[in-house]
Image (cartoon, grey):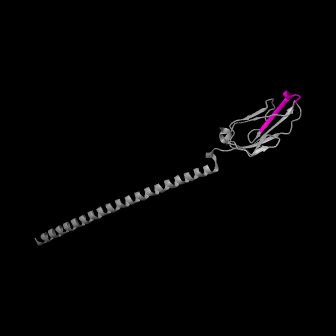
Amino acid sequence: GDLQRVAFSGVAPFADVPSDLVLPHDVADVAVHLSALEWTAPHKLEYQSMLEGARDWGPPGREPRAVFQNLAPGAYVFRARARLGRGPWGEPAELAFRVRPPWWQTWWARSLWLALALGAVGLLVQLRVRTLVQRQAELERQVAQRTARIEEQKREIEAHNESMTASIRYAERIQAAM
């Protein structure tokens, strides 16, 4: 199950703590069980823990366990310490680990999203330019057709004008002859 996707490079000697621990994003709930060597009065042990990168030192308590839920992707260092009664705190033990981001938040996925977005913008620009070029060609055809029609009408009007001018001159000659 989920443990097959957890990776680490080894276990630190005498500490029983994995090194280079890497957790997948969907196994980002971490529970750490604590223990301290105390045989005379284990019921008086108090523990305190922190998660560098997420939470500062918590209040001391007798529960030998720390739970962190819904950790965001990133690097963390878990620190825990113990004391007997109100005595001094012992040296903190550390566990460094990393929560991997989901694949859609990795740099290569973001690069892919960017490339896809740029490609889509380029495609939209190309389609718009093609549409504008087609519209320009259609308008040029319409202008050519209408210009040809106007020139035809001009020739017809000129021909009609010449005919009328000839008729008027003929009428003027008839009037002048009378």
137 and 29: which is toward the camera: 29
Q: Residue at x 83, y 31 (%)?
A: 46
Instruction: Provide residue 67's location: percent of width, then percent of height.
Output: 73, 34
72 and 93: which is toward the camera: 93
Instruction: Provide residue 20's location: percent of width, then percent of height.
Output: 74, 46
Where residue 90 sits, quadrant-wise, is top right
Q: Is residue 56 above or below residue 112?
A: above
Q: Is residue 44 magenta?
A: yes
Q: Is residue 116 above or below residue 146?
A: above
Q: Is residue 176 left or right of residue 119?
A: left
Q: Is residue 93 left or right of residue 125?
A: right
Quadrant of the rendering where the N terminus is positioned: top right
Q: Is residue 81 above or below residue 138?
A: above
Q: Residue at x 84, y 27 (%)?
A: 43
Q: Which contiguous range is marked in magenta? A: 39-50
Where residue 154 sits, quadrant-wise, is bottom left
